[in-house]
Image (cartoon, rainbow, N blue to C red):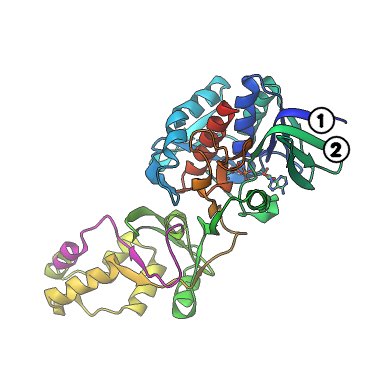
Amino acid sequence: MTLNSDWDVIIIGAGASGIMCATTAGYRGKSVLVLDHAPKAAAKIRISGGGKCNFTNLTVTPNHYLCQNPHFVKSALARYQPQDFIDLVDRHGLAYEERDLGKLFCAERASDLIQILRTEADWAGVEFLINTPIESVSYTHTTYQIKTPQQTFNGKSLVIATGALSFPKLKATGLGYDIAEQFGLKIIQKSPGLVPLIFEGRWADFCQNLTGIALEVAISIQNQRFQEALLFTHQGMSGPAILQTSNYWQKGMPLSINLLPRLDLPDEFKMLKKTNGSLTKFLNQYWPKKLTQAWLNLHPFDNLANQSDEAIEAYAQLIANWQVYPSDKAGYDKAEVTLGGVNTDEVSSKTFEAFKQPGLYFIGEVLDVTGHLGGYNFQWAWASGFACGQSL
Ligand code: FDA
């Protein structure tokens, strides 16, 4: 099939931000072509949220994002809010459900959501060319040339919506960063985010022995506090609390984990002492027995009745402020997102156009913007795609 060669807008990346941008620009009367090298569009939407896609969150604020310039996200997030996306899926009758902490998921399948996005793109007259590798990008005479094996396309504007490095098996690549560098834009150092943490030595043994056990914890790190589930794994720790923490953790930092965040432990332990209660039985009320046993092997404590109040306080602290040292993060193959990316100082927060390169735009995860776990990353994709699409 031969397509027109000349387009108002060419978007590289048929993921969340690319489709939203394409539709918005299409509805504004622009001719839009979306190119993607993957065999299907929106692969990450399809597999996200265990196949149900946590597509937004009811509590989005700029504080839910990491970015070297924390003000950068404000404009786009204000102009396209979670309710705007909810209105969109409501118009199509999508069934969805609210889970803990304001997370919204498809009730059935993420593919229902993709169908909605594709339908909107069709209505907006957007053309997709999938399964098409990008051979080169160049800029001459105020037009971008995008060379593919089939054809070379010319775009008055070029939007880079290629996402980031996480999950290479879904065809994630660093093309967006390469294009940014080709046009002289700076990249903030990248690393895996929302990713399990790996332990070595005795910590690794402790975790491995408890593989599959999950419990609610609270982890405080760099002025953030995450009270969610922790999951022990063969390699260390995962689960929402750890994935959130991984966005802030750097090599060498300890983690401070409260293993019983809903309890006032010193009070509970003093009460237990008075009633001559058993620590094992007490812990077993809240933890799987295997965890209690492993914990008491690691940190034995004699009968509470024989302990001073100071010793009891100190032991309560051990549980409420358990210090462990991860050795590393897992890699991009396990990471939901990529920290870092195109430096947002190089890009307008209103239009997403590069200051030094007219007609070149960057949206979504390729930018140095990373959301917390819970639908915040898709909300950024929708919001940045919408804001950019409105400016094209
Ligand atoms: P996205 O990755 O969606 O799209 C980029 C597109 O560019 C892809 O279609 C890709 O094929 C294409 N591309 C890349 N390189 C190319 C090249 N060289 N040539 C041509 N095309 C190229 N977030 C959330 O809010 N809720 C959730 O439930 C989840 N769950 C989740 C699970 C897993 C396993 C992962 C890996 C990620 C999530 N996320 C998430 C994160 C979320 O998927 C992510 O932040 C958004 O998809 C980013 O949207 P973008 O449009 O920026 O990139």
What secondary structure is marked by label 1?
A: loop
Secondary element at image label 2:
loop
Q: Nearer the viewer, residue 276 or 176?
A: 176
Label 1 neighbour load within 10 Å: few <14, some 14-19, many 20+: few
Sequence-wise, which precedes: disc 1 or disc 2?
1
Which segment did they paint magenta?
247-270
In the image, the residue with mark 1 has its CB under 8 Å from the nearest atom of ligand 1: no
> Which is nearer the eye, 343 or 283?
343
Please report the residue visible at 61 percent of the width from the left and 31 percent of the height from the top.
21
Does residue 265 belong to the magenta stretch? yes
Give whichever of 375, 317 is nearer the camera.
375
The image position of residue 31, as x and y in percent, is 71, 24
Quadrant assignment for the N terminus: top right
Q: Quadrant of residue 306?
A: bottom left
132 displayed left or right of 331: right
Q: Is residue 240 above or below residue 95?
A: below
The disc at residue 5 is 1
The amino acid type, in three-letter code, at marker 2 is Gln
Q: Quadrant of the C terminus?
A: top right
Which residue in the structure is indicated by mark 2? 151
